[in-house]
Amino acid sequence: MGLRSTRILASSGIMLALLAGVVRAADSVEVLHWWTSGSEAAALNALKTDLQKQGVTWKDMAVAGGSGVQAMTALRARVTSGDPPTAVQMLGFDIRDWAEMGVVANLDDLAKKRGWDKVIPSALQDFAKYDGHWIAAPVNIHSTNWLWINKAALDRAGGKPPETFDQLIAMLDNFRSQGIIPLAHGGQPWQDGTLWEAVVLSIGGVNFYKKAILELDPAALSGTTMRKVFDSMTKLKSYLDPGFSGRDWNVSTSLVIDGKAGAQEMGDWAKGEFIRAAKKPGQDFVCIRFPGTQGSVLFNADQFVMFNVGDRQRDAQLKMAAAVEEPSFQIAFNTVKGSVPARTDVPGDQFDDCARKGMKDVAEAAAKGTLLGSLAHGYAQPSGIKGAILDVVTQQLSGQISTNEALKRLPEAIAAAR
Ligand code: GAL
């Protein structure tokens, strides 16, 4: 073989390899998310399998850390280096921040073809759209004002779930006398914030939540009701075990599953862990709205924001967005994850009692104006303000600052973050 034909062969070989690369890239999605617990990973598997069936390869970019704080840091690094992932799990105001930077992709055509406008609740569309354009595919609706109770422990405490904050305290006292950890909690800012926002709603009610958390009214943030909120946090702290600091949320959930702890305040992703451990609602565990917050829902919703990745991954990206909104996927994913569907037209018959209660609560709260964005999960304030509030909450709960200092710092920290 002459030198020329060798060169031709070699270069066509390179061409083939390049083409193969292009084909592979076009059929793959790289997905950044923080779903690393057993139930979270199992739920996500439904999407991986769906896409695999359509010939789309999944490149996993999992960044552990509840509520996605670490994932957002990882995203910043990727976008800064000009190499964003195809799709990113994201919450509320973070979606707006990235959209503002002009780095996200447009999903209008797909949304129009599939009629998303008609089936996605407006509370989610407010964030899934930017400037009137669809930029994200909502996956689910979670809510944070739940209490998960070990049924056997509750039965030993009289069997009646608490309806008020005072009844909650009485139940926790009983759990203590049973020799178990009364309240399972993990001391991390986002978890402290998840507990705190439920206490704010329980102690202050809907209008107070709106004033303090949504409107950031300085008087509400430092007044007598907020004092009662922080005092209630101190009271709740007396029911935590010494090992609470830094504990992951799913480790706390397993303490309740195993009967080592009586209850946990947590979003309904905790239910995913109960289900994964083959526990049944009403039989092994009880799900109730955090006492004093019945009738209101503090919501968060996971969404996949699509990034501008050019033509190379566009087809696969659209396949992923379409798959997420398929009613069959909404059922397969959310029954495992603990959340409820992001679409209003998905029937509830395949969901368990807690999820059915969740669906009903969300619909009723939306109708009467008590569907409120969760602060700890990005649906009440942009991340700077959220972080400033959670810092104060964590410092108070961990005993670094007193209630008096927390009341003084809260409005100050917010003003500085604005
Ligand atoms: C939330 C998210 C849930 C779950 C949870 C714990 O912010 O919406 O899907 O992952 O964090 O990591």
Image (cartoon, helix red, strand yellow):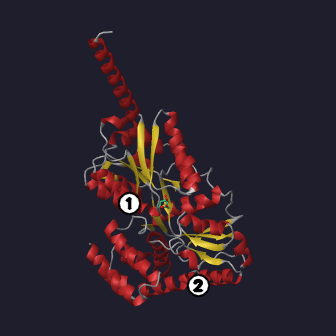
**Which residue lies under the disc numbered 2?**
166
Q: At label 1, which amino acid type do we have?
A: Gly
Task: Write the residue at 48% across / 87% down.
Answer: 231
**Which residue lies under the disc numbered 1?**
92
- Res. 201 in view: yes
Estimate the x, y position of residue 174 in percent, counting from the top left. 68, 83
- Name the side, left or right, on which 180 lies relative to 201: right
Is 17 or 143 nearer to us in this picture?
17
| In front: label 2 or label 1 | 1
Is 322 or 1 nearer to us in this picture?
1
Q: At label 2, which amino acid type do we have?
A: Asp
- Name the side, left or right, on which 353 lies relative to 18: right
Task: Write the residue at 39% across / 85% down.
Answer: 406
Quarter the N terminus occupies: top left
Q: Is residue 117 above or below residue 210?
A: above
Residue 157 numbered mark, or none: none
Is 219 or 38 nearer to us in this picture?
38
> Please, what secondary structure does the residue beneath circle 2 have?
helix
Is 200 or 99 nearer to us in this picture?
99
Task: Write the residue at 51% across / 75% down.
Answer: 245
Task: Write the residue at 39% across / 27% down.
Answer: 20
> Please, what secondary structure does the residue beneath circle 1 have?
helix
